[in-house]
């Protein structure tokens, strides 16, 4: 049995060795033998294609700065508010003012830098700073009179003046900012009504037949807009506001603003929650787009992915408006001297302040090198 099997096995082995050799040769023919030809082909391609590649890279339009009409280095002025934002726990000085860092980060996350407009600074300094920025944010807060009110009013008038002179100069007024604009435009300091909307996340209801295009909601995905009407994606924190009826009854207000949304307070009372100026790049929101992303002091602040996106879309809208402000071409050094990076924020969240971080400003004896 052994003897008969053996020759057969040897034959088989010889046959398989032959087959492997044949395969090896075939493979060599297909690969190694072609390598020199392939290398020559590649070299030819390289010498001919390489210059073309460089040429096309040089003239590739999307790599160079794009629309010359836009300003891709927008700077936003944020007006400081009286106090330290932490009920005196950080600073008790009577002339201290603060900017919650959430407003700064809100502008930064959409591609802008920030210059603080410190309301206690002399008017000429504030006016010079207005020429360093491409848009303004009025923040939330509580102060409705005195120097702060006058400074906000003066800056609002400058915003109108700049736009009337052909410079696109946007303004975003948030919460108190919205309320102050309502008072200033109506020329009625008693126009606001009381609402119960402290620490309340809410929905927004869009005004019927609203055209979203050209408004803060213009680039929101339709699905998100729909969700805003059913889910509490915006943060309210106010005791005052204006009802749609009262706004519409005031000729100055309804001539200036168109209502975009309303919301209801804890007692189901409706108030105006978003407006857009008819003829100016001015948006006013009773709610806080900056809180969803950056504030953690109230358990009511919505932090869902949808809520974060709402904030991001508002920031993107506002900074896209600021990019249209290309008239201001200040000296770089003047911008750098005044940027918020010259200040350090304080951690207020830890001492039960209303905000996580605040920038504090006390009037400086020597003013910045404007
Ligand atoms: C501010 O004043 C209050 C009340 O007098 C005091 O409790 C607090 O420690 C002071 N804050 C600072 C930062 O000094």
Image (tube, rainbow, N blue to C red):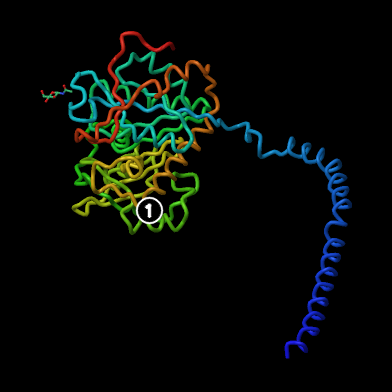
Q: Nearer the viewer, residue 327 or 360?
A: 360
Residue 247 lies left or right of residue 19; in this view the side is left
Q: Nearer the viewer, residue 256 or 146?
A: 146
Ligand 1 has an atom within 8 Å of the beta carbon of the residue at disc 1: no
- Image point (21%, 30%), residue name: 86
- Image point (46%, 56%), residue name: 222
Q: Position of residue 9 (x, y in %)?
A: 77, 82
Q: Position of residue 6 (x, y in %)?
A: 77, 84
Which residue is most to the top?
Answer: 366
Q: Within the displayed image, which quadrant is ligand 1 positioned in?
A: top left
Residue 151 lies left or right of residue 35; in this view the side is left
Say which quadrant the N terminus sits in: bottom right
Q: Position of residue 209 (x, y in %)?
A: 43, 55
For residue 368, above or below residue 28 = above
Q: State which quadrant residue 102 falls in.
A: top left
**Residue receiving disc 1:** 206
Which residue is most to the bottom?
Answer: 1
Q: State which quadrant residue 4 falls in.
A: bottom right
């Amino acid at each position: 049995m052994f003897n008969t099997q053996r020759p057969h096995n040897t034959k088989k082995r010889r046959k398989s060795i032959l087959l492997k050799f044949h395969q090896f040769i075939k493979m060599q023919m297909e690969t190694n033998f072609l390598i020199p030809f392939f290398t020559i082909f590649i070299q030819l391609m390289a010498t001919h294609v390489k210059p073309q590649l460089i040429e096309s890279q040089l003239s590739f339009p999307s790599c160079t700065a794009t629309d010359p009409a836009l300003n891709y280095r927008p700077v936003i002025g944020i007006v400081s508010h009286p106090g330290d934002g932490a009920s005196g726990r950080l600073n008790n000085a009577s002339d201290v003012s603060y900017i919650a860092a959430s407003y700064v980060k809100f502008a930064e996350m959409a591609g802008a830098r920030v210059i603080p407009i410190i309301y206690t600074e002399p008017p000429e300094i504030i006016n010079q700073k207005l020429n360093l920025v491409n848009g303004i944010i009025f923040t939330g807060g509580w102060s409705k009179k005195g120097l702060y009110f006058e400074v906000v009013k003066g800056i609002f008038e400058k915003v109108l003046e700049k736009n009337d002179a052909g410079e696109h100069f946007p303004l975003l007024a948030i919460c108190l900012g919205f309320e102050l604009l309502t008072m200033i435009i109506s020329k009625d300091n008693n126009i606001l009504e009381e609402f119960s909307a402290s620490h309340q996340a809410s929905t927004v209801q869009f005004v019927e037949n609203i055209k979203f295009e050209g408004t803060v909601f213009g680039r929101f995905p339709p699905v998100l807009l729909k969700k805003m009407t059913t889910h509490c994606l915006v943060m309210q924190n106010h005791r005052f506001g204006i009802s749609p009826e009262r706004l519409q009854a005031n000729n100055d207000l309804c001539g200036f603003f168109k209502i975009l949304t309303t919301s209801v307070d804890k007692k189901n009372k409706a108030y105006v929650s978003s407006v857009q100026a008819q003829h100016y790049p001015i948006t006013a929101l009773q709610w806080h787009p900056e809180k969803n992303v950056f504030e953690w002091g109230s358990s009511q602040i919505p932090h869902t992915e949808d809520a974060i996106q709402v904030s991001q879309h508002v920031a993107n809208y506002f900074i896209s408006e600021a990019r249209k402000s290309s008239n201001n071409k200040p000296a770089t050094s003047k911008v750098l001297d005044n940027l918020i990076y010259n200040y350090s924020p304080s951690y207020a969240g830890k001492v039960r302040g209303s905000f996580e971080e605040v920038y504090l400003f006390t009037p400086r004896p020597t003013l910045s090198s404007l």
